[in-house]
């Protein structure tokens, strides 16, 4: 038999005809493929048992579009754990998919590296009113024109119900049918590449969702009780019979890169991926992704609550070799600075200027210090990591949903403070990330939503209320009526973007476009040079950052979250311009185009006057004396 297989598991079409099925199923003694619909159906074909618990066999009559299940020991039929598509959801039959049917147009695409990226987090179901790949595709040109460079798509692994965030996926290889078919997803990626946009896929390798999870019918060894996580059973990456489990997830990582031309992965909650193997599964995933990319550049971003910098250190230095880490510290300090509230997990943040200076220079704020909210130390050293390895954000799916009413941050702070903080994030040398609609101040909330059966929905609703109760203000009886029900369709519908707000909120949109253009085109702000920024605290709510570029080119960024500040005297050497120069305004958050009131010269004969709730970028320009030539030493 002249078989051609790409992966160790799944249904793969053969050049000579038919479909070859292979599945890891050490629990049953007999496995049959039941063809239920489409080409070759109805039919039942028994697979041959192989070593290590695998079953495999060629089914000549099965073709592209055939719907099938695996029958195990005559005890029941179940979808394929490696199904490429579930047209009727995770409880339905799997479908044979021909990945070569789609004709790609991105042959010259080289992928995306970390440096220079501006990430845009997107939930396909709420990004447009239609909630489909096809509708989202229509907005790609506008995103690219705005200055976005990479889209981070929230999880699309198949999940049950009519709506959900995707983090309770159960079909790891099957793009959820709610957004379209597999080729619709491919078309989205292909079109993104046409506009110069990379696509990063959010994947969940720390647990499997509770509804539609049939893995235990094939093997109980997919899971382990030796570890605990926050969402259910842990994946068995290091126990007995872990080899095929590791291969399942390594194959999944490669599959998205190869068959969907994805440019990288965002790994959810890596603190709940436990592995004591000689080679950690995260290291192995990184290697497999690079291999699958065949020379294309890729980005692997990790979410890691305890802030373990080992994840992005080189493998030769004992790290996992991933590319970047989400920086919750930046978000938390920013929220406190903008809102004045620091309850619950914001407890260890004051939103003070020194925090932002430290994060711009060193990434995480907590790199091993005592963290009183958790009553333990948090973080590991990362002082010398390149700034681009820290992904910074003012909003993301979790943090918006964790607000009292799922509100966007503009409803919790002043316009001036938000403009100033946005400038700080977008001009700092980290890797910035925007959440969908943030660029035009979308008014739509972003709630937690999940369509589950009634009993599970009640448990989810209770768990959500418990999570939010860590905020003293949200735990009050008067707030209870305002906590939305995640299972109601209206909760989901209210989260959809209204793109007419791009024009209604044109001032905010223009500000983001201008900042991203400045970040992209200015030789200093675009450099992301390690050690290229220094800073100083000018007042209780005011800071300066000085950016040192190549060839002596410098920039100054002043950010004032407080009241108008008159610095007289101004005994801070970082304020001094280069010799023969004076600071001139390059960009200001108080530009009337953005809703501001204008920006007089900051450095004048009256010394420094820095407006409140403002960020101003400055560049050095020659003085009149320097323009006409100096007469000698002064």
Image: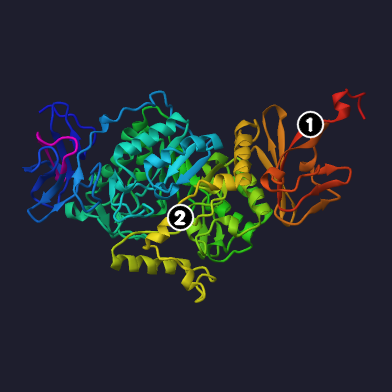
Residue 164 is situated, as x and y percent measured from the top left of the image, at 36, 55
Q: In the rendering, at what x and y percent does residue 374 appear?
A: 50, 64
Query: Which numbered dot is residue 495?
Result: 2
The correct choice, above or below, for 410 with respect to 598 in the image is below
Identity of the residue drawn at 71% across and 34% down = 554
Under circle 1, the secondary element is strand
Real-space Cα separation, disc 2 to disc 1, in angstroms: 46 Å
Q: Which residue is mark 1?
A: 621
Residue drawn at (39%, 47%) of the image: 130
Whether pointer 2 and pointer 1 mark residues with C-beta atoms closer than 8 Å, the reply is: no
| In this picture, residue 73 sits left or right of residue 469 | left
The numbered mark, 2 or 1, whose residue comes first in the sequence reads 2
Residue 211 pos. (x, y %):
27, 58
Q: Residues within 10 Å of mark 1 (few under 14, many from 20)?
A: some
Q: Quadrant of the N terminus?
A: top left
Give the answer, above or below, for where 6 lies relative to 384. above
Residue 296 versus residue 448: which sits nearer the camera?
448
In the image, which residues are magenta? 53-67
Q: Which residue sits at x=18%, y=33%?
A: 13
Q: Quadrant of the C terminus?
A: top right
SS for callout 2? loop
């Amino acid at each position: 038999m002249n078989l051609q297989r790409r992966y160790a598991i799944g249904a793969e079409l053969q050049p000579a005809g038919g479909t070859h099925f292979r599945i890891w199923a050490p629990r049953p003694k007999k496995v049959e493929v039941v063809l239920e619909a489409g080409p070759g159906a109805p039919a039942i074909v028994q697979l041959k048992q192989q070593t290590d618990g695998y079953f495999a066999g060629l089914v000549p009559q099965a073709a592209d579009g055939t719907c099938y299940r695996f029958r195990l020991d005559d005890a029941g039929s179940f979808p394929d754990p490696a199904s490429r598509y579930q047209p009727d959801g995770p409880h339905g039959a799997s479908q044979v998919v021909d990945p070569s049917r789609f004709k790609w147009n991105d042959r010259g695409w080289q992928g995306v590296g970390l440096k220079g990226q501006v990430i845009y987090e997107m939930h396909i179901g709420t990004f447009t009113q239609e909630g489909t790949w096809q509708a989202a595709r229509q907005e790609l040109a506008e995103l690219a024109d705005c200055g976005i460079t990479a889209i981070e798509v929230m999880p699309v692994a198949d999940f049950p119900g009519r709506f959900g965030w995707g983090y309770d996926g159960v079909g790891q290889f099957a793009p959820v049918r709610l957004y379209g078919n597999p080729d619709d997803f491919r078309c989205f990626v292909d079109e993104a590449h046409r506009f110069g946009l990379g696509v990063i896929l959010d994947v969940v390798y720390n647990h499997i969702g509770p509804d539609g999870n049939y893995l235990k019918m094939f093997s109980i060894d997919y899971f382990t009780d030796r570890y605990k996580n926050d969402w259910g059973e842990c994946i068995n990456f290091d126990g007995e019979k872990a080899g095929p489990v590791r291969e399942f997830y390594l194959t999944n990582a490669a599959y998205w890169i190869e068959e969907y031309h994805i440019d990288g992965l965002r790994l959810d909650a890596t603190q709940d991926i436990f592995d004591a193997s000689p080679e950690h599964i995260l290291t192995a995933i990184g290697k497999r992704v690079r291999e699958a990319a065949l020379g294309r550049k890729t980005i692997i971003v990790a979410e890691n609550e305890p802030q373990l910098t080992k994840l992005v250190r080189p493998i030769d230095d004992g790290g996992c070799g991933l590319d970047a880490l989400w920086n919750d510290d930046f978000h938390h300090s920013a929220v406190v600075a903008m809102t004045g509230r620091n309850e619950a997990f914001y407890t260890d943040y004051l939103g003070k200027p020194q925090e932002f200076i430290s994060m711009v220079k060193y990434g995480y704020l907590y790199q091993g210090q005592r963290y009183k909210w958790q009553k333990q130390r948090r973080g590991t050293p990362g002082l010398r990591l390149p700034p681009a390895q820290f992904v910074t954000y003012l909003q993301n799916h979790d943090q918006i949903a964790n607000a009292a009413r799922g509100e966007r941050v503009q409803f919790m702070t002043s316009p001036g403070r938000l403009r100033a903080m946005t400038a700080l994030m977008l001009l700092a040398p980290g890797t910035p990330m925007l959440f969908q609609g943030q660029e035009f101040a979308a008014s739509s909330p972003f709630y937690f939503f999940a369509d589950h059966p009634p009993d599970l929905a009640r448990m989810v609703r209770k768990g959500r209320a418990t999570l939010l109760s860590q905020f003293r203000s949200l735990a009050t009886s008067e707030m209870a009526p305002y906590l939305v029900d995640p299972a109601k369709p209206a909760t989901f519908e209210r989260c959809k973007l209204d793109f007419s707000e791009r024009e209604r909120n044109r001032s905010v949109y223009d500000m983001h476009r201008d900042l991203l253009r400045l970040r992209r085109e200015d030789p200093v702000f675009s450099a992301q040079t390690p050690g290229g920024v220094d800073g100083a605290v000018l007042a209780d709510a005011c800071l300066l950052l000085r950016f040192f570029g190549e060839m002596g080119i410098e920039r100054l960024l002043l950010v004032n979250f407080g009241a108008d500040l008159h610095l007289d005297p101004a005994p801070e050497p970082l304020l001094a311009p280069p010799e023969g120069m004076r600071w001139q305004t390059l960009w200001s958050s108080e530009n009337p185009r953005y809703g501001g009131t204008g920006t007089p010269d900051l450095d004048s004969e009256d010394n420094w006057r820095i407006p409140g709730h403002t960020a101003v970028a400055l560049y050095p320009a020659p003085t009149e004396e320097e323009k006409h030539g100096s007469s000698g030493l002064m």
